[in-house]
Image (cartoon, helix red, strand yellow):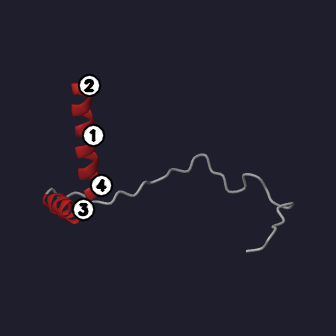
């Protein structure tokens, strides 16, 4: 690394994109991932759909308890 860098020609916010969405990676344990993949295949849908439905249902359950 250099001791100093020249940012005098830099443009503030050049790469800022307020509409950009961040996809958060979720890492599952192998046994859970295998189960969800099998279940999704059985239901003829993708893993994301299954996980999202399960999470939405869990949120609804928690909301009714609290």
Q: Are marks 2 and 4 in contact (CB under 8 Å)?
A: no
Image: 33 above or below 62: below
Q: Quadrant of the C terminus?
A: top left
Q: Nearer the viewer, mark 2 or mark 4?
A: 2
The residues tagged by marks 2 and 3 sit, at their Cα atoms, a distance apart of 28 Å
Q: Which residue is mark 2?
A: 66
Q: Earlier in the sequence, mark 2 or mark 1?
A: 1
Q: Nearer the viewer, mark 4 or mark 3?
A: 3
State the image quarter where residue 4 is shown.
bottom right
Q: Residues within 10 Å of mark 1 (few under 14, many from 20)?
A: few
Q: Earlier in the sequence, mark 3 or mark 1?
A: 3
Q: Which residue is mark 1?
A: 56
Name the spot of residue 19 as percent of width and height, x first.
Answer: 57, 47
| 66 sits left or right of 7 in the view | left
Residue at (61, 46) in percent of width and height: 18
Q: Nearer the viewer, mark 2 or mark 1?
A: 2
In the picture, the disc for residue 48 is: 4
| 2 sits left or right of 47 in the view | right
Image: 52 above or below 25: above
Q: Earlier in the sequence, mark 2 or mark 3?
A: 3
Q: Residues within 10 Å of mark 4 (few under 14, many from 20)?
A: few
Q: Earlier in the sequence, mark 1 or mark 4?
A: 4
Image: 55 above or below 23: above
The residues tagged by marks 4 and 3 sit, at their Cα atoms, a distance apart of 16 Å
The residues tagged by marks 3 and 1 sit, at their Cα atoms, a distance apart of 20 Å
Q: Are marks 4 and 3 in contact (CB under 8 Å)?
A: no
Name the spot of residue 40 as percent of width and height, x first.
Answer: 19, 58
State the image quarter where residue 55 is shown.
top left
| 30 sits left or right of 10 in the view | left
Q: Which residue is mark 3?
A: 29
Residue at (22, 45) in percent of width and height: 54
């Amino acid at each position: 690394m250099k001791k100093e860098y020249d940012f005098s020609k830099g443009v503030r916010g050049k790469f800022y994109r307020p509409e950009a969405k961040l996809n958060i990676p979720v890492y599952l344990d192998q046994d859970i991932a295998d189960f969800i993949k099998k279940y999704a295949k059985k239901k003829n849908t993708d893993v994301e759909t299954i996980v999202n439905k399960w999470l939405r249902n869990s949120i609804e359950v928690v909301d009714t308890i609290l």
